[in-house]
Image: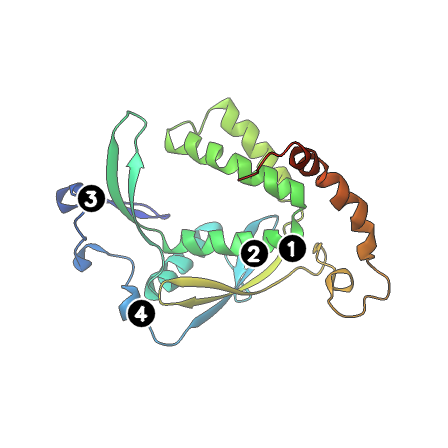
Amino acid sequence: MDANLLHISYEGGILEDPSAEPEESMWLWSVSPEDAPDTATYIELEYLKGDVVAIDGKALSPAEVLAQLNTVGGANGIGRVDIVENRYVGMKARGCYETPGGTILLKGHRAIESITLDRELAHLKDELMPRYASLIYNGYWWSPERKALQALIDDSQENVNGKVRLKLYKGNVIVVGRESAADSLYDADIVTFEDDAGAYDQSDAGGFIKLNALRLKLASKLGRKLT
C-alpha cells in the first residue's frame, strides 16, 4: 500500500491474481457503495481559472480542497478503481486505487469546462490529456515537453470560472448544475427549443450539410458501400 494526498494504491498479494476480488477490509478511505448513505450528499465547487477555490462557499487551499473531497467522497463510496496497467518496463500489473477527491474533481472540472471552454480548445485538450498523463505516469514531470503542455493547459483555463453543483450517491458523482456569470459560452437565447426571436436560423446549416455530405454522395455514385 502506498498513500499520498491524491490517492492510495494497493498492489501485491491476492491482487496479483487479476481474477480475485479484493477483500473489503483492504479499502481504507472509502466505504463500499452498498454501505454508503441512502441519502445523497450535495456539494458546490467554485472555480477560478480551472482550480477549485471554495467548497459550499468556504474558501480553501488546494490541499484543503482535496482533503475535504477525499473525506466526503469516501463516505459516499466514491473513487474505487481496479485496473490492470501497462507498465513502462513492459509488463502488465494489476492495482487497486482509492481516489475519492480526484474522482470528484475530474467530474466537476469537466462540467465547468463544458460551459466555459471553446469547442475546439476543449477537443485539443482532450487529445493532449493521454499524452500529459503518460508523461507523468512514466516520471517525466520535469521534462521540457511536460512543461510546454502545461503552459498550453494553463492558458486554456483562463476563463474556466464559475460554480458546479454535484450530487454524491453510492459511488456516483452526478452533475446537477453548472453556472458561470462572466464566462459562460452557453446562450439560452440561441439554444432554446422555443421561440428564439430570430437568434438562430436553422436554414443557415443547409449549405454546410450539403458540403459535408458531398464525399459520401460521390462514393455512393460509384456504388461504394460505407459499412
> What kind of residue is marked 3?
Pro
CA–CA distance between discs 2 and 4?
24 Å
Instruction: Give the labeled residue for mark 3.
Output: 18
From the image, state whether disc 1 or disc 3 is nearer to you.
3
Q: Which of disc 4 and disc 1 is earlier in sequence?
A: 4
Tell me where residue 172 appears, x and y as whole percent.
40, 63
Instruction: Give the labeled residue for mark 1.
Output: 115
Instruction: Give the labeled residue for mark 2.
Output: 111
User: In the figure, 16 relative to 43: above or below?
Assistant: above
From the image, state whether disc 2 or disc 3 is nearer to you.
3
Helix, strand or loop under label 2: helix
Marks 2,3: beta carbons within 8 A: no
Marks 2,4: beta carbons within 8 A: no
- Local packing at callout 3 (Cα closer than 10 Å; few below 14, some 14-19, many 20+) is some
Helix, strand or loop under label 3: loop
Tell me where residue 125 appears, x and y as whole percent.
57, 39
CA–CA distance between discs 1 and 4?
31 Å
Please tell me the numbered disc located at residue 36. Answer: 4
Tell me where residue 70 appears, x and y as whole percent.
37, 57
Front-lying residue, 224 or 189: 224
